[in-house]
Image: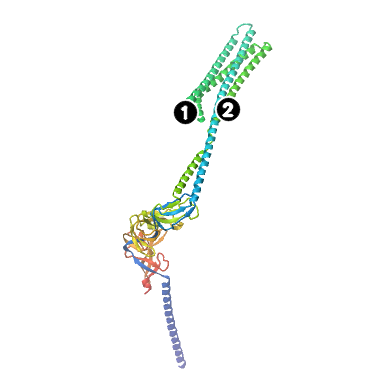
């Protein structure tokens, strides 16, 4: 019994220990779950982006254009003074207002007198040089005319001598052929004992006919050559009567045209002569061959005489050809010499240049003499303000303007530089307000006179720039003052506008982030969705979207404390502060 009681007590103690351990384990588990929950919510608050949202609203977009510029003269007058004169005094300052006729500068009168003397001496030297140039040119022209005349005479003599030489050679050739023909005729009669040889007679007749044909062809060639030369002379004579100053080139052109007219006939005549010579030679060869056959037994002296006569004919034919070739060469040489003599001389512009220099020096002298009459006093040409003085006392005047004056009678204007974006909303006739920089004083209401593209940007990164001009009239702000121009323009009313901070761009496409509420196992969560939009217009604060891009109920993200993307979970700033 005692042991049973001890065993039961042991069991009770062990069960009590197990219950204590189980209770402790449950408490530990609950504590861990609470810790993990706190950590989870802390991690969730750290990783989820906090955003601010707005809804699209209808409104007009006010665009304010504000630029700074300067007041400049409507018209500037540049006062130039003859260069190279010593400045004696300048009694005015830059920025000073002057009246028309007020003294601006005095020149050194003594230096002015010296410059006038020097200009006159230079003109006299140039005139003497011009006379020398004219004299040399006249002598060169006379020499050229004389050379051209002699070359023309030599050309005419060469043509005449060439024709005479060719005629004499042709005459000698004709005589040699006649001697050969007579010898052969007598030789045939002697061989035949005075009898008649019908074959030889026929051959002799053929030779006679060919000789006559050759003579006729040669005479026709000579006639055509003479006729061509006469035609050339007549054409040149007529042309010189019409134009006494006919140039060598024009004469050669006219000669070529006349010779071209006779070219076909002369070529035909030359071919006829060559053909007649060839046929005569063939007839003579036939007669010679016949005589050779008939006279094989004739005496050797007759054969030698005949060969000598035939050789003389060949020599005379060769002499005719050489005479023709030599005549052509001599004519060509004389013609080229005539062309060279009549060729225009090389251009010489020294005389013209000297005349221009004289005119320039005379114009300078007239200006200097006008300043001398004014006693070297330079006065203001208009009522205005001196904007710049480019001369200095003791220095010589330069090629640029000595003074620049703003013409007050023409009034002033305001000019400023606009960006390409600003120029889209500003046009001629738009009302603007001008205020003085520094004091902020309102100077008045004006209208835009023009908006034009600037000549060039001040820097390469400035982009497209424009210039706005506002005419101020004669009673406007002071010249050179810095002024701010303001213009406020309203657009049409747009139904869907969002802050610029809500607008994003990716690959040249505009979009906004829209917050959507979605259900999950842990409850409702907020996520963002990308919505592409089309921007109709925008100003510095808001952008107007095309109709249908968004609804008025959609919440648009205008700020996020970190980068978000499509599907990202977000937390509204109002919730994060709760």
| Image spot of residue 48 (x, y percent) | 41, 70
> Which image quarter: residue 282?
top right
- Residue 523 is at least partly visible in this image: no
> Is disc 2 placed on a helix, strand or loop?
helix
Which callout, 1 or 2, points to the residue nearer the camera?
1
**Circle 1 crowding by C-alpha within 10 Å: few under 14, some 14–19, many from 20:** few
* Tag 1 near tag 2, CB within 8 Å: no
Tell me how far mark 1 sits from mark 2, CA to CA. Answer: 26 Å
Which is nearer the eye, 521 or 461? 461
Is 109 rendered above or below residue 570?
above
**Circle 2 crowding by C-alpha within 10 Å: few under 14, some 14–19, many from 20:** some
| Image spot of residue 535 (x, y percent) | 36, 59
Which is nearer the eye, 556 or 69? 69
| Image spot of residue 266 (x, y percent) | 52, 22
Q: Residue furthest right?
A: 300
Q: Quadrant of the N terminus?
A: bottom left
Which residue has dot 1 on it? Answer: 243
Residue at left offset 46%, top offset 46%: 369
Q: Residue furthest bottom?
A: 2
Which residue has dot 2 on it? Answer: 333
Q: Residue furthest top?
A: 194
| Image spot of residue 17 (x, y percent) | 45, 86
Which is nearer the eye, 423 or 191? 423
> Which image quarter: residue 30?
bottom left
Tell me, for residue 480, which label it has, or none: none
Q: Quadrant of the C terminus?
A: bottom left
Is 230 rendered above or below residue 60?
above
Instruction: Answer left or right for 169 relative to 460.
Output: right
């Amino acid at each position: 019994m005692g042991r049973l009681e001890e065993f039961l007590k042991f069991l009770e103690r062990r069960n009590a220990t197990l219950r204590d351990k189980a209770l402790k384990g449950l408490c530990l588990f609950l504590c861990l779950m609470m810790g993990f929950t706190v950590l989870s919510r802390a991690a969730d608050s750290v990783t989820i982006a906090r955003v601010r949202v707005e809804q699209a609203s209808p409104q007009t977009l006010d665009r304010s254009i504000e630029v700074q510029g300067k007041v400049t003269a409507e018209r500037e007058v540049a006062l130039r003074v003859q260069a190279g004169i010593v400045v004696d005094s300048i009694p005015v300052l830059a920025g000073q207002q002057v009246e028309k006729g007020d003294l601006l500068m005095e020149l050194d009168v003594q230096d002015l007198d010296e410059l006038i003397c020097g200009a006159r001496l230079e003109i006299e030297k140039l005139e003497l040089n011009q006379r020398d140039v004219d004299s040399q040119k006249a002598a060169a022209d006379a020499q050229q005319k004389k050379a051209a005349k002699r070359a023309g005479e030599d050309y005419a003599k060469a043509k005449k001598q060439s024709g005479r030489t060719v005629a004499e050679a042709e005459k000698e050739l004709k005589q040699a052929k006649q001697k050969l023909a007579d010898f052969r005729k007598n030789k045939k009669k002697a061989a035949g004992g005075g009898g008649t040889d019908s074959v030889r007679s026929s051959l002799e007749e053929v030779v006679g006919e060919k000789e006559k044909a050759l003579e006729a062809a040669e005479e026709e060639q000579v006639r055509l050559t003479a006729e061509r030369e006469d035609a050339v002379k007549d054409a040149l004579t007529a042309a010189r009567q019409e134009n006494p100053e006919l140039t060598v080139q024009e004469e050669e052109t006219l000669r070529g045209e006349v010779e071209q007219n006779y070219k076909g006939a002369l070529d035909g005549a030359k071919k006829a002569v060559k053909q007649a010579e060839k046929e005569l030679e063939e007839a003579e060869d036939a007669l010679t061959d016949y005589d050779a056959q008939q006279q094989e037994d004739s005496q050797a002296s007759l054969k030698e005489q005949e060969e000598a006569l035939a050789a003389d004919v060949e020599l005379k034919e060769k002499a005719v050809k050489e005479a023709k070739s030599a005549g052509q060469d001599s004519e060509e040489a004389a013609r080229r010499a005539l062309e060279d003599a009549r060729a225009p001389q090389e251009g010489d512009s020294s005389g013209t240049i000297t005349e221009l220099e004289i005119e320039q020096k005379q114009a300078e002298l007239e200006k200097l003499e006008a300043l001398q009459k004014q006693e070297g006093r330079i006065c203001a040409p208009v009522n205005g303000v001196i904007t710049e003085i480019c001369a200095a006392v003791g220095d010589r005047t330069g090629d640029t303007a000595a003074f620049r004056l703003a013409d007050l009678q023409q009034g002033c204007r305001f000019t400023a530089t606009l960006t390409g974006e600003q120029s889209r909303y500003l046009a001629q006739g738009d009302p603007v307000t001008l205020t003085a920089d520094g004091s902020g004083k309102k100077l008045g209401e004006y209208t835009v006179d023009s908006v034009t593209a600037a000549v060039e940007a001040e820097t390469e990164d400035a982009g497209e720039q424009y210039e706005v001009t506002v005419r101020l009239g004669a009673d406007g702000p002071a010249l050179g003052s810095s002024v701010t121009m303001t213009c406020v323009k309203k657009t049409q009313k747009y139904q869907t506008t969002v802050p610029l901070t809500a607008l994003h761009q990716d690959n040249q496409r505009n979009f906004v982030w829209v917050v959507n509420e979605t259900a999950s196992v842990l409850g409702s969560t907020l996520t963002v969705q990308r919505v592409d939009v089309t921007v109709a217009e925008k100003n510095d604060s808001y952008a107007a979207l095309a109709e249908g891009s968004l609804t008025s109920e959609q919440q648009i993200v205008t700020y996020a404390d970190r980068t978000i993307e499509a599907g990202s979970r977000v937390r509204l700033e109002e919730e994060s502060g709760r």
